[in-house]
Image (cartoon, rainbow, N blue to C red):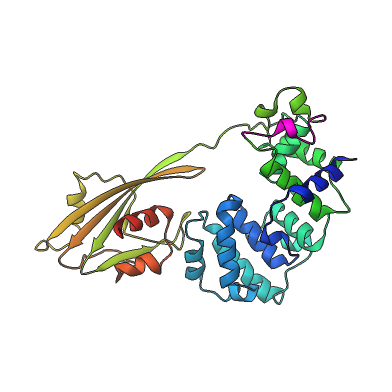
Amino acid sequence: MNTSNILINWYQENKRDLPWRNTADPYIIWLSEIILQQTRVQQGLPYFERFINQFPTIYDLANAYEQDILLLWQGLGYYSRARNLHQTAKIIVDKYNGKFPDDYSDIITLKGVGEYTAAAIASFAFGKSYPVIDGNVFRFISRLFAIQEPIDTKSGKKEITNALNLIFDQKNPGLFNQAIMEFGAIHCTPKKPKCDTCIFNTQCEALKSKKVMSIPVKKGKTKVLTVNHTYLCFIYEKQTYIEKRTTGIWKNLYQFPLIEEHITSDNIANIVNHYIDQNSKYEIRDCFESRHILSHRKIDAIFYTIYVNTPPVFSKNNIFEIPLTDMITRFPVSILTQNYLKRLNQ
C-alpha cells in the first residue's frame, strides 16, 4: 500500500469531526481556513460557529458593518484576517455575483488568500489537484524524508514541495490534503510525536536517524521588538473617551487615548494635566499593567483609570465620547484593552 492510501485510511479512521469537513460549500471552507490561519482548531471552532450563525451566506458577510465583524472576531488576533474576510466577501458578491471562483488562479488573487489557502479551497471545495503545505505538512514531510534544509528558506520549501509531490494523490486531492494535515496536527506533533504507534515508523527517515525532534529545521527566529503603550481611560459621569486606530495590527479597532511611551506613575500627573482645565480635579484610581506577545513584537502596556470632574480636552479631533458600558459591548478592541475592560467591569 502506498503512502497516500495509508494516510487516507488513517484519516478516515481517526479524523476529528469538524463542521467544515462535512461540506463542499466554498464559502464555509474559505471561512474556516481564514479563521484557522495562525489559530488552533480548539480556539477557532467557536468563532467559526458564531460567524456562520451571524453570516450564513457570503451576502450576509459582504453586507455587514466592519465594526460588527471586528467585534465578532475580537480575541482571535491578527485582525487583518477579519478585514480581508470582509473585503473578499464584497469582491465575490460584486465581481462574481456571489459565486465563489472555482479556478485556483482566481482564488489566489482574493485578499487574504495565499498559496496554502487557495490550494485548500480549490481541493476541498472543487476537487482540484493542488497540494496544501501548512505547518503540519512541513513537519510531517520533513521528518518522513529527513529533510534538513531550513523550511523557512526558498531551497527548503522547494525540497519539501518536491518530496510532497512524490506522495500526493492526484485522484483524491481534497481527501489527501485533509489527511496529511490531520496527521501532522494530531499524530506527528511538534513536541510529543507518537512515533511508537506511527503507521510510518518503518519508513520515517528522521526516526531511523534519531532526528525526529530536531526536524524540521528553521534558519532563524524573528527578531522581537519591544514597544510601550500608555492608555488613558478618562471617566466623567459614566462617560469615557476613545479613538479609532487607523494603522498597525489593530487598525480599525477602538482604544483609549494612547501615548506610545512608558509613562510611570510618578510622571502620569504631568500628562493628565495636559488634558484637563487647571481648576478641574481628578483621581487616578487604578493602574493596570499588561503584556501582549506577538510573533514580531512584545507590547508592554499600562492603563490608567482617571476619574475627572470636568470633561477632558483633546487636541486630536478623532477622540469622541461614549458611555463606558458601550466600550465593553459595542466596540471591537485589542486583547490588551479587552483584558483591561474585564478588570474595570469587576
Res. 156 image quadrant: top right
Q: In this view, does 280 lie above or below 96?
A: above
Quarter occupied by the C terminus:
bottom left
In magenta segment, residue 194? yes
Secondary structure predominantly adopted by residues drawn in magenta: loop
On the question of residue 109 being in view, the answer is no
* Quarter that holds the N terminus: top right
- The residue positioned 73% from the left and 43% from the top of the image is 183
Q: In this view, does 337 lie to the left or right of 309?
A: right
In the image, 85 versus 48, the foreground residue is 48
Name the residue at 55% across, 63% down.
83
Task: Provide the residue span drawn in magenta.
Answer: 191-203
- The residue depicted at 63 percent of the width and 76 percent of the height is 59
Q: Residue 81: x, y in percent? A: 57, 58
The percent position of residue 68, horizontal first and vertical second, equals 49, 70
Q: Quick one: 152 or 74, which is closer to the camera? A: 74
Is 51 magenta? The answer is no
Rendered location of residue 324, percent (x, y): 30, 67
Q: Where is residue 337 in the image (x, y as percent from the top left)?
A: 37, 56
- The residue at the point 69 percent across, 52 percent down is 16
Q: Is residue 147 above or below residue 237?
A: above
Q: Can residue 231 be seen in this view?
A: yes
